[in-house]
Amino acid sequence: MSTVTVPDVTLSASAAKRITAILTKQDGVDFLRVSVEGGGCSGFSYKFDFAEAVNAGDLIVERDGAHVLIDEMSLEFLRGAEIDFSTELIGAAFKINNPNATAGCGCGTSFSV
């Protein structure tokens, strides 16, 4: 597997740790895929999926052995973003700290640019 370095998108240490923990429990799954789709209450939404293989054109973000795939179209919306995992009183979830988002919804899963 060749890794493409994408300094524009980073993983926090907590996200890398959580991704590794999740993927070790998934049989045959080696990657977390993060993508951006149209929809959501603010215009665009983040989508998290498991992936077994790298698709043509995918970019790989790696930290501490955790691998995240991002397709080229989604990367345009994610440049400069950090994928994080936080545990708070209201629950634990992946969060994307996206400097491109001009507005977002209260739950943090959709945004506008």
Image: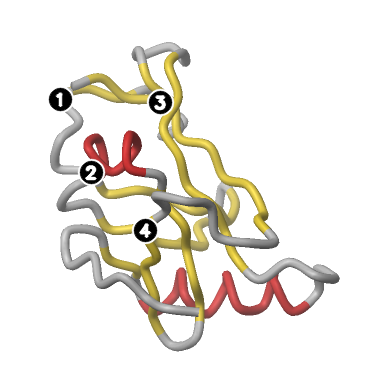
Q: Are marks 2 and 1 in contact (CB under 8 Å)?
A: no
Q: CA distance from mark 3 to mark 2?
A: 11 Å
Residue type highlighted by circle 3: Ser
Q: CA distance from mark 2 to mark 4?
A: 17 Å
In front of the other: 85 or 80: 80
Number of the front mark, 2 or 4? 4
Residue type highlighted by circle 4: Leu
Q: Residue at x 25, y 59 (%)?
A: 9
Q: CA distance from mark 4 to mark 1?
A: 24 Å
Q: Residue at x 17, y 59 (%)?
A: 8
Query: x, y percentage for residue 99?
Result: 14, 42
Residue named by callout 4:
59
Q: Specify which label sits upstream in the sequence, 2 or 4.
A: 4
Q: Specify which label sits upstream in the sequence, 4 or 3.
A: 4
Q: Is residue 111 above or below residue 3?
A: above
Label 3: element kind: strand
Number of the front mark, 4 or 1? 4
Please give the label number shown on residue 89.
Answer: none
Q: Is residue 46 above or below residue 80?
A: above
Please give the label number shown on residue 98.
Answer: 2
Residue named by callout 3:
110
Q: Are marks 3 and 2 in contact (CB under 8 Å)?
A: no
- Is residue 103 shown left or right of residue 74? left
Q: CA distance from mark 3 to mark 1?
A: 11 Å
Q: CA distance from mark 4 to mark 3?
A: 22 Å
Q: Residue at x 47, y 75 (%)?
A: 16
Query: x, y percentage for residue 36?
Result: 41, 32
Query: x, y percentage for residue 57?
Result: 39, 49
Please give the label number shown on residue 102.
Answer: 1
Label 1: element kind: loop
